[in-house]
Image (cartoon, rainbow, N blue to C red):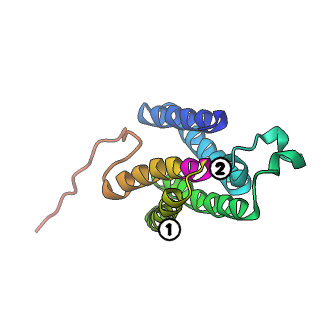
Amino acid sequence: MKFTEKVGVVLCLIGISMRLLNITGGTLFVFLSLLVLACMYLFLGFIFYNDIRLRNLFKKVSYSNVDAGKIFIGILTGILHFIMLSGINFRVLNWPAHFILLCAGFLLTFIYTIIILILHVNRPGTLYFNILVRSAIMLVLALVLILAPGLHFERNMQPDYKQKTSL
C-alpha cells in the first residue's frame, strides 16, 4: 500500500473511534477519508496499481514498461474500488442505499478479483498482485459489513424507550 492509502485508512479508523466515543467530527473524518480514498482510486487508480509515482504522472519515461492493457485494467479496477469504498462509506455512516452499493460493489469486485487471480496465475506481475491485495482487503471488509447488519459505528446516547400499549 502506498503512503496516501495508509494515511486514509488511519484517518478513517480515527473517525470511527471518534464516532464510537461521541466526539464531534468523527463523521467528518470518516466521510472525508473514505471519499478521498475513493476518488483517488477513481481518478488515479491506474497510477497506484501500475506503481507509477504521482510526481512522474506526466513523464513519458514512467510509462515505458506499461502497455495500454495494464492501464485499462488499472482504470477498471479504480472504478470498481470506487464503488466498493462508496458502499463502505455509506454503511459506516448508516446512510440509505448502503446495502445496494455494498452488494453491487462486492459482487463486481469478487468477479473481477477471480479474473485477476486467473491472470496472475498465468502471468505473474506486480499489477495483478497489487490489485489482489487491495481487492482482498476490501472484499473482507465489505463481507463483514454485509453479514453484520446490526453493527453500528456510533453510540446511542438516548435510552431505548418502550412504547406503552393499551388494550
From the viewer's perspective, is residue 129 above or below residue 25? below
From the viewer's perspective, is residue 33 above or below residue 148? above
Residue placed under numbered mark 2 in the picture: 49
Quarter of the image with the N terminus is top right
Q: Is residue 17 left or right of residue 165?
A: right
Give percent across and percent down for residue 93: 49, 50
Residue lying at the far right of the rendered structure? 59
Say whether residue 160 is magenta. no
Q: Nearer the viewer, residue 7 or 167?
A: 7
Which quadrant of the structure image shows residue 21?
Answer: top left
Disc 1 packing (10 Å; few <14; some 14–19; many ≥20) = some
Residue placed under numbered mark 1 in the picture: 108
Cα–Cα span, label 1 and label 2: 18 Å
Q: Nearer the viewer, residue 161 or 30?
A: 30
Secondary structure at badge 2 equals helix
Secondary structure at badge 1 equals helix
Q: Nearer the viewer, mark 1 or mark 2?
A: 2
Q: Dots 1 and 2: beta carbons under 8 Å?
A: no
Residue lying at the far left of the rendered structure? 167
In the rendered structure, which segment of residues is drawn in magenta?
126-131
- Can residue 93 be spotted in the picture? no
Give percent across and percent down for residue 57: 83, 46
- Seen at 22% across and 57% down, the residue is 163
Give percent across and percent down for residue 25: 57, 35
Which amino acid is tagged 2? Tyr
Q: Nearer the viewer, residue 80 or 166?
A: 80
Quarter of the image with the C terminus is bottom left
Residue 23 bears which disc, if any? none
